[in-house]
Image: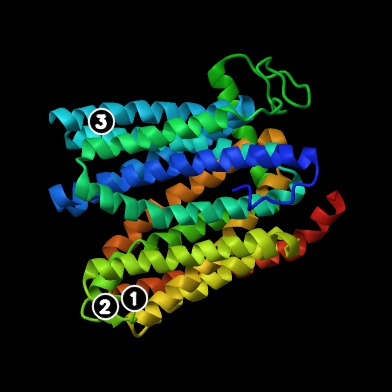
Amino acid sequence: MNIIFANAGSSKEGVWTRRVTLLLTGQTLSLLGSSVVQYAIFWHLVMRSDSGSVMAMAMIATCMPQAVVSMFGGVWADRWNRKILIIFPDAVIAGLTVLLSAAFAVGWANLPLIMLVLAMRSAGGGVQMPAVQSFIPQITPESKLMRVNSVNGTLQSANQIAAPALAAVLVNVLPLWAILLVDVTTAIIGIGFTASIRVPESAGVQETGETSDGKIVESGIAARIIRDLREGFAYAWESRRIRSVILGNALVCFINVAPMNLTLLLINREYRHDDLNLGFAVFSSTSDKLAANELAWSIGMIIGGLLMSSIGAKRIRDCLRAVSVGFVLIGITTTGLGLAPTLLAFLIVDFLTGLATPLAASPAFTMLQQESAEDMQGRVFGLLNAFSTFGTPLGMMVFGPLSDMIDVRLIFIIGGALTIPLGCWLGYVDSVTRHTVLSKR
C-alpha cells in the first residue's frame, strides 16, 4: 500500500501516509475475514435449509441492526475516541465468532443462534463504519481525501473478488467452525494495525461534557445521546448539499442497489442455457455464470477505483457534480443489464456498472468529509450509513415479490431509469449551491 501513496517527500507527509496505510491495511484484512465468514455462513444456510424465508431472515439480520446502530454510532464517533470505536467492535465480533465456532464444533449451533450472531456482527458494523469514515479525515490532509477514499474503495472491491473465492476454497477443505476462526485471526491483525496509529485526540465533544464551541451539554447519557441525534439530524438537514447526498444515496440503494441483488434470478432465468466460450474460459454451468457476474462487476470497481485514486483525485474539483454524473452512468448501465440480449453483453454492461460506481461513491465520501464540521462527521456518516442500509432491504421487500410477478429484466430497466433523474437532481443541487461552497473556501 505504500506504493499507492508513494512520493511522500516530507516527513510530515510520511506521517499521514503511515497512518492511512495502517488504517486501510488493518480494515481491509478485517473486512476480508468478515466477508469470508459471511459467505460461508450464508452458503451453510442455503445448503441446509434451501429456504427463501431463511435467506430473507439472514439478510434482515445482517442489515437492520447496522442501520439502527449507525445513527448512534455516528453520535459516539463525534463524542468518543474514534480509534477505540474502530477497535472495540472488531474485538467483540471476534469474541462472538469464537463462541459460534465452538457451538458448531460441538454440534450446538442452531438457526436462532446463527441469526443472533449475524445481528450482533451487523450491530458492530454500525459502530465501526461511521468511526472509520470520520477517522479518515482526522489523519488525512484535505487535499488527499479523494485519493484515500478512492484507494479505500478499490481495496473493498478487491475484497469482493478475493472473499468469495477464498470462501469457496475453504468450504471444500475445512469444517465451518474452523473457517469462522479466519475472521478471528484477521480481526486480531486489524486491531493491531489500528492500535499502532498514533494521532492527537479529535476535536469535538470531549469527555468533559463540552462541545467544540464551548457549550455545556445536558447531564445524563440518554439525554446527551438524544440531544446529539437531534443536532446531527438538524445539521445534516440544514445543509442542502449534505442532505441531498444522504437522501440521494438512500434512494439509489432502494431503487437500484436492491434490484441488483436479483442478478442471481436474472442469470438463472434468462441465461441458463446461454453458454459462453471466451477461449481462455468457458461458462456453462449456472455457478460459472454467477462467478463471472461477480468477477465482471468487481474488476470494473477496481479499475474505476484506481482511476479515481489517480486521475480523479487530481481533476475532480466539485465532488457533488461527480456524484451526479456517477448516478446517471449507473442508471444507464443498470438499464442496460435489463436490455442485454446475450450473456456476453450482460457481463460487459456489468463491468461498466462496476466501473461507474466509484465515480459516485468516492466523491460522496470526500464531499461529506470536506463539508461537515469535524465534531459532526460521525453523525453525518452515521446517517448516511443508516439511510443507505435501510434502503436496500426495503427495496428488496418491494422488488423481490415483484420479480415473481413480472419479467425480472423489467425490474432492472425500471431501477436504472429511476436512477437517472436522481443523478440529474443532484446536478441541479450542485448548480444552485456551488457558489456557497466557493465562498466558504
In this view, 362 is above or below 130: below
User: Looking at the image, which residue is at 63% across and 53% down?
Assistant: 4
Question: What is the number of callouts on the image?
Answer: 3
Q: Counting other residues with Cα less than 10 Å from the Cα at mark 1, is it few (<14), some (14-19), or many (20 or more)?
A: many
Q: Secondary structure at mark 3?
A: helix
User: Looking at the image, which residue is at 23% across and 48% down?
Assistant: 171
- The residue wearing badge 1 is 409
346 or 225, which lies in front? 346
Q: CA distance from mark 3 to mark 2?
A: 38 Å
Tell me which label, 3 or 2, sits earlier in the chain. 3
Report whether 166 appears left or right of 328: left
Give the percent coordinates (x, y) of residue 437. Answer: 80, 54
Give the percent coordinates (x, y) of residue 17. Answer: 68, 42
Give the percent coordinates (x, y) of residue 251. Answer: 50, 58
Q: Which mark is residue 100?
A: 3
Give the percent coordinates (x, y) of residue 105. Answer: 17, 31
Q: Secondary structure at mark 2?
A: helix
* Residues tagged 2 and 1 counted as in contact (Cβ below 8 A): yes
Q: What's under tag 2, amino acid-wise?
A: Glu
- The residue wearing badge 2 is 270
Q: What's under tag 1, amino acid-wise?
A: Arg
Q: Residue 213 appears in which quarter of the rendering?
A: top right
User: Looking at the image, which residue is at 71% across and 26% down?
Assistant: 200
